[in-house]
Amino acid sequence: DAAYWIAKYVRLLRKEEYYANVRKDLLGKIAAIFYLTRKNKLGNKLGFRIPRNCFGPGLSIYHHGCIIVNESARIGANCRLHGNNCIGNTGTIDINPQIGDDLDLGFGAVIIGNVKLGNGVKVGANATVVRSFPEDNVTLVGTPATKK
């Protein structure tokens, strides 16, 4: 069942974060590497690449399939990803999105570049966000994304 494996991936991500951030001793470093390896192996099967310390608490992933997050991106608490998402830089400069709490990223939605989004932002399916929307509780749709 895909929901089981997705939940297991998120648990492995959180265990890796715990041992890397809290446990600074040798055992913590070894455990962090152990959970990183298990997470990456499962991530390859599910199509996920999510580095540690990018998401706040409450990450929810609804579907397996390509989810790529740049290690410099910062996303707040209670983020919901619906699958086939990318959050990262443009490839020309290494400046990544900074996103508030309660992001709802629709299927196929992409957030790239030096983008800042407020709290409670909903991004529609297949939307491409390439500029900042610092306001709270907005819905973004289209390519490039605009407020609905």
Image (cartoon, grey):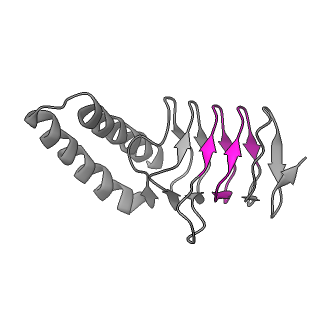
- Can residue 117 be seen here? The reply is yes
x, y percentage for residue 20? 26, 37
In front: 95, or 7? 95
Residue 99 to residue 114: above or below:
above
In front: 86, or 43? 86
> What residue do we see at 57% from left, 45% from top?
62
Quarter where residue 79 is shown: top right
> What residue do we see at 60% from left, 44% from top?
98
Q: Residue furthest bottom?
A: 92
x, y percentage for residue 129? 73, 56
In screen coordinates, is 1 left or right of 35? Answer: right
x, y percentage for residue 97? 61, 50
Residue 59 to residue 1: above or below:
above
Q: Which residues are magenta?
A: 97-123
Q: Residue furthest right?
A: 148
Q: Is 107 included in the stretch rendered in magenta?
A: yes
- Can residue 65 be seen here? The reply is no
Q: Is 80 included in the stretch rendered in magenta?
A: no
x, y percentage for residue 33? 19, 47
In screen coordinates, is 108 left or right of 127? Answer: left
In screen coordinates, is 108 left or right of 92? Answer: right
